[in-house]
Amino acid sequence: MTVPMSVTVASPVGPLVIRGTERGVQAIRLGGEGQVPIQKGPVRAAEPGDINGPVPIRDAVSQLAEYFEGRRRQFDFPLDLEGTPFQRAVWACLQTIPFGETRSYGWVARAIGRPGAARAVGLAAGRNPAAIVVPCHRVIASDGSLGGYTGGLHIKRFLLQLEGLAK
């Protein structure tokens, strides 16, 4: 069994802690969980060559830098996420929400065949281990309000604005 490795890289939303193995990225966490200020100006993320670790982690670093630079809309490195079957279904559904679009918690619940589970979808989104890449920031309340976000609403708002949505 491969031992997970973690790296921390700079981003406009503060430090991102990326953990994974050769199998895939297991987690992308916002370093300050709710206390991270939005950084102004360019931020240099570590380059893949700066990191001596598994390919999925190096790819995640590179692709996240491209995302924040406005050059990437989808991620294609492997994920190796752990969660309940329900959580994994929610996270898989979240990955189908296109860049620059939002969906409601109710929409996600219906999409996974659990139409009455909008609140449970919100809980699963809140336990999303791979921030940004599993785009729970694209899920909003049915009334159009932002809903919640583990990293803080200011980060959710920033990510949506980065994707061209004024929220």
Image (cartoon, helix red, strand yellow):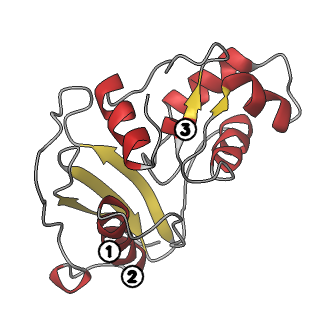
Residue 163 x/y as whole percent: 45, 49
- Does residue 74 sit above or below 127 in this rendering? below
- The mark closer to the camera, 2 or 1, is 1
Give, as a three-letter code, the residue at label 1. Ser
- 96 displayed left or right of 20: right
Question: Of the numbered discs in the image, which one, if any, rests on residue 55?
Answer: 2
Residue drawn 89% across and 33% down? 113
Q: Tag 2: residue type? A: Val
- Quarter of the image where one finds residue 102: top right
Q: Determine whether 19 is above or below 63 in the image.
A: above
Q: In this view, does 52 lie above or below 129?
A: below
Earlier-in-chain disc, 2 versus 1: 2
Amino acid type for the residue under numbered disc 3: Arg
Q: Position of residue 56 (x, y in %)?
A: 42, 75
User: What is the quadrant of the C terminus in the image?
Assistant: top left
Place of residue 52 in the rendered image (x, y in percent of width and height, measured from the top left):
21, 82
Judged from the image, the secondary structure of the residue bearing numbered disc 1 is: helix
Pick the front one: 7 or 132: 132
Measured Cα–Cα span from mark 1 to mark 3: 22 Å
Label 1 environment density (alpha carbons within 10 Å; few <14, some 14–19, many ≥20): some
Q: Residue 138 carries which label?
A: 3
Of tags 2 and 3, which is closer to the observer?
Answer: 3
- Disc sitting over residue 42 in the figure: none
From the image, tell me which residue sits under label 1.
Answer: 62
Horizontal side, residue 78 vs residue 109: left or right? left
Mark 3 closeness class: few <14, some 14–19, many ≥20 residues within 10 Å: many
User: Which quadrant holds residue 84?
Assistant: top right
Quarter where residue 22 is shown: bottom left
Q: In this view, does 121 lie above or below 14?
A: above
